[in-house]
Amino acid sequence: MFATVEGARSAWESIVAHALRSFLTTLGIAIGVASVVAVIGLMQGMQASIAAQFEGLGGNSLSIAAFTPVEDRLKGKVARLTPDDLDRIAERVDGIASITPLLSLPLQAMAEMRHGTQVAFAAIQGTTHTYQQVYNAYVQSGRFLSPTDDQRRRRVCVLGEKTRENLGLEDPIGAYVEMGGEWLKVVRIMESRGELFGISQDDYALLPYSTLRSMNDPLADTDIAIQVAIAEGADRTAVKARITQLLRHGHGLQPGEPDDFDIQSPEQISAAFGQIGTALTAVVASIVGISLVVGGIGIMNIMLVSVVERTREIGILKALGATRRQILMQFLIEALALAVLGGAVGLAVGFGLAAAVTALVPSLPPAAVPLWAVALSLGFSGLVGVAFGILPASQAANLHPIEALRYE
Amino acid sequence: MALIEMNGIRKSYAMGGQRVDALRQVDLAIESNEYVAIVGSSGSGKSTLMHIIGCLDTPSAGNYRLNGQDVEQLGEIELASIRNREVGFVFQSFNLLARADALRNVMQPLIYRGVGFGARRRMALAALAQVGLSDRAEHRPNQLSGGQRQRVAIARALVASPSILLADEPTGNLDALATEQVMALFDALHAQGHTVIVVTHEAEIAAHCQRVIELVDGRARSGSG
């Protein structure tokens, strides 16, 4: 303990005595750590924001969509989920709080909408009143789609905030917008969901499911996606198994044939994103690890020069009674201090960099530097300092006192 | 029992494949509170002898007892501890730490004894007062004159209360006035009960001492002062 305190004291004196040199020496480590911290901060911020987005999908829900294996697609077969599937699940699966169909326009996700002279492209989906429960989506103004809208195929729509803006609707509720030759009455504007990767999540229009079906060519094969909210207390795995069984039966699949649909929970999707994020973080971290090693070599180099330069000083210290171990500790602590100092500077710069990037690029979510990244970068800097400080320090420690004293 | 007892000390170096004997046969004894000059022409081995006395180096052969301890048996850590506790070095070229002020220089040996900062400071200030440099504690070596630097070095040698003060040509780099002051300081320290050994080639310096040991061709010839 005493040796460590004294080593730190003399390391500090020596670092301050050569302030500029110390700064340049630590630059390599500082840059390395700064880039680690900035990148991890941005990645973590993004992951946190993705997680928050998926929260909006409803914590306990399942997404069912048709899935065509690649071989079948090559054969021209396309799997579909049909309104019959929707009815089947709605009627025969227990433990479902609400079930929502999502109908897209055939072959296109976006459609042109007009209001006066304003033209906007928006993602169009047909759905029912249950959408609100399943997606935890909330009203900004007006009313949501009602069951009677669906039954009567009313020409009404609900707009996302961004679509309202694009259409230049100042007073949207009750206004009429044109889509595909039909006039739709706007009944509601949805609360803003913000941006994800710079893409607005508010550029969409929701129509009653049956309305959109009737607007499509009635003969066209319909493919829908189904969103299911699971009732409180119900077992998601059991619900999923029951749906799988129903759909396989309904689609006439033989045992051994693969499912022609895919059931996903938000956790699965968010976990997939999480895995991508983790892999990216690991790649970046290892690249930066290399830069830390380079920084460590810089420290070793300067320490070696410093040992030669201070040969006489080392001789004096030995004459005054310093042991080999004490000299070793002094130089090792100096290398460690240089590295950790660089790490600390890098940490501050990295925080600043991440904050600056998120401030300059508005579509990026705020950066979040986790504590483990702070600990890891400081710890790794220290490790680099010790690893690359050992050679110069032992060189200093092993100097013969008389030869060191005679050194000019 | 003498403070320093040397019997048959030999020190040889390998130089260019040849063995060179710096010391051939040194037998000497120095008592506590003696004031001894070790003289000799250049190349007579007096620096080597001083290094061995100060435990900076170990003899190739012979027996050296310092304060009753067999030195040639000791390992690196024990030798460092002896240098720290038993010996106070004063060098011709001062050998102060350039980066540290006078106070820090004097405090330095106490670090290796494990003395805490506060106590270290107190002891160092007392040692600086002893050499009359209390008002120079904050000065760095390059802000001090040669005589002052050597007095700081003496304070540093004194601070750990060693058994021996070992000075190697302490006035070699000093002018007449500073030489006078430094030697007066050694005289005073001897009068206070310190054991002082001065290695020198100057007769005037040796004249301050009670006893002169002359080194000729690696052999010691002891006279009395």
Image (cartoon, coloured by chain):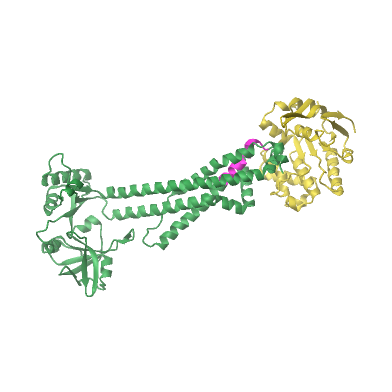
Chain colours: A green, B yellow
Q: What are the residue bounds of the magenta stretch?
A: A322-337
Identify the residue at horizontal 81%, vertical 40% (top origin). B169
Q: Main secondary structure of the magenta part?
A: helix
Left or right position of A403 against A147: right
Residue B72 vertical position relative to residue A14 in the rendered view, above or below: above
Identify the residue at horizontal 57%, vertical 48% (top origin). A338
Residue A162 visible in image:
yes
Most distant residue in the left direction: A219
From the image, which quarter does the N terminus of chain A lie in?
top right
Magenta highlight on residue B151:
no
Report x, y in % for residue B192: 83, 39
Report x, y in % for residue A185: 18, 69
Residue A99 visible in image:
no
Viewer-closest of A146 and A11: A11
Magenta highlight on residue A330:
yes
Identify the residue at horizontal 22%, vertical 55% (top origin). A134
Viewer-closest of B6 and A291: A291
Report x, y in % for residue B22: 78, 31
Residue A183 vertical position relative to residue B115 in the rendered view, above or below: below
Left or right position of A147 against B66: left
Left or right position of B160 against A33: right
The image quadrant that residue B116 belongs to is: top right
Report x, y in % for residue B43: 81, 35
From the image, which quarter does the C terminus of chain A lie in?
top right
Viewer-closest of B62 and B111: B62
The image quadrant that residue B195 belongs to is: top right
Left or right position of A297 against B43: left
